[in-house]
Amino acid sequence: MENNNVNTINVPEVKYTPKDFASDVDVKWCPGCGDYSILAQVQRTSPDFGVKKENMVWISGIGCSSRFPYYMNTYGFHTIHGRAAAIATGVKLANPELQVWVATGDGDMLSIGGNHFIHACRKNINLKIVMFNNKIYGLTKGQYSPTSEKGKVTKSSPYGTVDYPFNAIKLATGSGATFVARTMDRDPKHLQEMLSRAAKHNGLAFIEIYQNCPIFNDGAYLPLTEKETKPDNVVVLEHGKPLVFGANKNKGIKLDGLNPVIIDLEDGKNSINDCFVHDELDDNPTRVFLLARFTDIPGFPTPIGVFRQFHKTPYDIDLMNQIDFLTEKKGKGSYEKLMFTENTWEVA
Ligand SMILES: Cc1ncc(C[n+]2csc(CCOP(=O)(O)OP(=O)(O)O)c2C)c(N)n1
Ligand code: SF4
């Protein structure tokens, strides 16, 4: 029966604007740093992420990129180097209703944090990991990172690195990430689209963002971002569409067995129907490895976009279901009982 004694107040739903997500902390990145664009695109898209501001959290490790949570007017935690994924996991499991974002660098996530990263992907923890890849350690002033190209001369590799770099897309895919994407600081619209799509994904979403560090690795992505050179060096992945690139969309990529080949779409020998068609929903990760390899083959365009997305029950859902099931079956557990069962000993 309706209770007529209850007074109700209709509170209009809050419509956020990008400004609502900007904190009042002075942004301390170097002039021209790509991190500014990433911050702006995150603040621009946050109102559409579908969560209340108080339910959004940004967790980071240590690095220039990891200063990110200070600049977001949300809950956040600037933690310790390499541990962002582990701490974010704890935040998500203790508070499953939160949307947990991780801001991290290539050093933070792939060097010291590599282990946490692969296991977060493997377990499909419902985190959104945004990795700013400037192919260098920025905060500590220019040492090479696990994504620096072989032979890179830096302060910590004065004769050139002898390391082979990680390909972050391959690593995330091989570790089981259920949403894998790449975008660039200098392509704001595309960056916004990737963020919005990651926000809607139910499971671990990984976005690699190519980010320029003008102080210690300036121009690392110049051929991909300059107006004149971008069309020949970037191929945009769109679900269901053929891989076509070039200023006049005059080049395509076809498969010769398992090898990608660049074809000329104007020479009369090839047509758009010969091109490899992108399918981000394909269960088989082989396609992603094929695409991710483009950056390792000289002359090939760099793919940006969603490489792959698929559904797998996220860790937190399975865990909560298990806890509910066992609580119903065995009753609420007791911490005291757990700590002082027969399997404890007093050391004399
Ligand atoms: C345990 C520990 N080891 C090393 C460091 C030093 N350190 C701080 S940030 C950083 C790397 C930063 O590079 P990256 O994550 O790529 O971020 P960027 O500064 O380029 O955004 C290192 C090695 C540290 N703070 N703590
Ligand atoms: S050192 Fe590089 S990454 Fe760090 S704030 Fe400066 S420009 Fe940005």
Image (cartoon, rainbow, N blue to C red):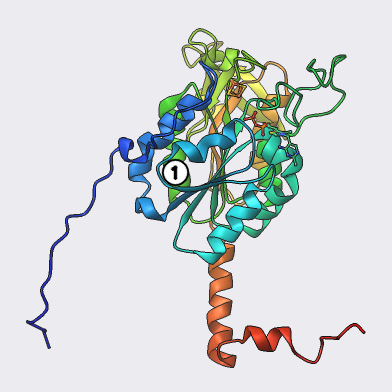
Ligand 2 appears in which quadrant? top right
Q: Between 105 and 187, which is closer to the camera in this rendering?
A: 105
Seen in the picture, residue 131 relative to 313 is either above or below; the reply is above
- Left or right of 48? Residue 330 is right
**Does the numbered disc 1 mark a residue whose Cβ is under 8 Å from ligand 1?**
no
Q: Is residue 289 visible?
A: no
| Direction right: furthest residue | 348
Residues packed near mark 1 inside 10 Å, few (<14), some (14 to 19) or many (20 plus):
some
Quadrant of the rendered image containing residue 172: top right
Residue at the far left in the pictured view: 4
Residue at x 42% of width, y 46% of height: 74
The residue singled out by tag 1 in the image is: 197
- Asked whether residue 216 appears in the rendered view, the answer is yes
User: Could you tell whether 3 is left or right of 347 in the image?
Assistant: left
- On screen, 31 above or below 205? above
Q: Which of these two is toward me, 110 or 274? A: 110
Q: Residue at x 58, y 20 (%)?
A: 212
In this rendering, the answer to whether 113 lies above or below 95 is above
Residue 147: % across, % down? 72, 29
- Amino acid type, residue under disc 1 in the picture: Arg
Nearer-the-camera pick, 66 or 133: 66
Residue 340 locus on image (x, y percent): 74, 88
Q: Position of residue 348 (x, y in %)?
A: 92, 84
